[in-house]
Image (cartoon, rainbow, N blue to C red):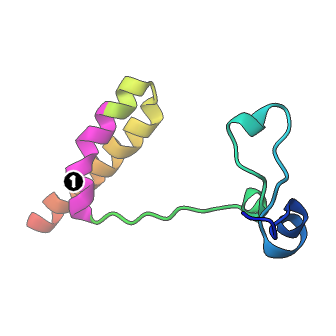
Amino acid sequence: MGAFTPVPLGNFAIGVNAVLPTGGFARSSSCTSVRDFQKTTSLAYVTQEGFARLQETVVTLADEEGFPAHANAIRVRMARLDAAKKARAT
């Protein structure tokens, strides 16, 4: 912003990029940056209690969305946890 901040300063010296995406994507996307070329990763950790609270919801949603393998993965884990719980109780 201002008279002493021309676009070339942004592009080459102060880190504000004016390179816009092509193919009409400039209407809905920001200027390109280093972040556009970096891969991000997500991590998650759920306790057994958390799994117990979420399992039925996930099975219901997976079934409704048409992802039977996802629902079955939860069902199998549920069955294994139930079997281990019964084995410990005996």
For the N terminus, the quadrant is bottom right
Q: Is residue 5 magenta?
A: no
The outermost residue toward the bottom is 13
Number of numbered discs overlaid on the protein picture: 1
Q: Residue at x 76, y 39 (%)?
A: 26
Nearer to me, 41 or 13: 13
Please, what is the dominant secondary structure of the magenta stretch?
helix
Secondary structure category for the residue under label 1: helix
**Is-magenta flag for residue 50?**
yes
Q: Position of residue 8 (x, y in %)?
A: 90, 64
Q: Pinpoint residue 28: horizontal percent, then vertical percent.
A: 67, 37
Instruction: Give the residue at x 46% y 30%.
Output: 67
Judging depth in this view, the residue of 7 and 34 nearest the camera is 7
Q: Position of residue 69 (x, y in %)?
A: 46, 35
Nearer to me, 31 or 51:
31
Residue at point 81% right, 43% down? Answer: 21
Please name the residue shown 80% across and 60% down the image: 17
Q: Range of the magenta residues? A: 48-60
* Left or right of 17, for residue 65: left
Q: Which residue is mark 1?
A: 52
Q: Amino acid at mark 1?
A: Ala
Residue 90 shows in the view: no
Drawn side of residue 4 relative to residue 76, left or right: right
In percent of width and height, residue 5 lies at 80, 67
Q: Is residue 69 left or right of residue 55?
A: right
